[in-house]
Amino acid sequence: MPKKIRELKAMLRKAGFRWRPGKGSHSIWEHPLAEKSVTLAGQDGQDAKRYMEAQVAEQIAIVESQQ
């Protein structure tokens, strides 16, 4: 079962990412130690796409390895 968008946002927040608004339902998450920003598209209650889950996990792993 896929994670919800709100769960991915909570994971990013916990890892120290900062949110900035995007267009429409997009939100952009940035961290000074991350290689790239993470863009999430969708409302909080929607299921996240597989590529979003993978992107979030990858960037969090990068940040945690550099701390």
Image: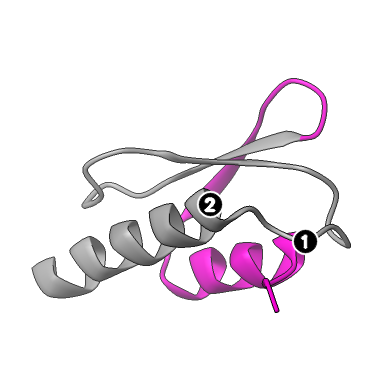
**Distance from label 1 to label 2 (Cα)?**
10 Å
Q: Residue at x 21, y 42 (%)?
A: 35
Total numbered badges shown on the rendered structure? 2
The magenta stretch spans which residues? 1-25
Residue 2: where, in percent of width, then height?
68, 71
Q: Secondary structure at mark 1?
A: loop
Amino acid at pointer 1: Asp
Q: Tell me the crowding category of disc 2: few under 14, some 14 to 19, or many 20 or more residues within 10 angstroms, Cα based.
A: some
Residue labelled with disc 2:
52
Residue 17 figure quarter: bottom left
66 within the magenta span: no
In the rendered image, the quadrant that contains the C terminus is bottom left
Residue 27 figure quarter: top right
Residue labelled with disc 1:
47
Q: Secondary structure at mark 2?
A: helix
Amino acid at pointer 2: Met
In the rendered image, the quadrant that contains the N terminus is bottom right
Q: Residue at x 53, y 51 (%)?
A: 52
Q: Are marks 1 and 2 in contact (CB under 8 Å)?
A: no
Residue 66 figure quarter: bottom left
Residue 22: where, in percent of width, then height?
67, 26
Figure check: 19 above or below 6: above
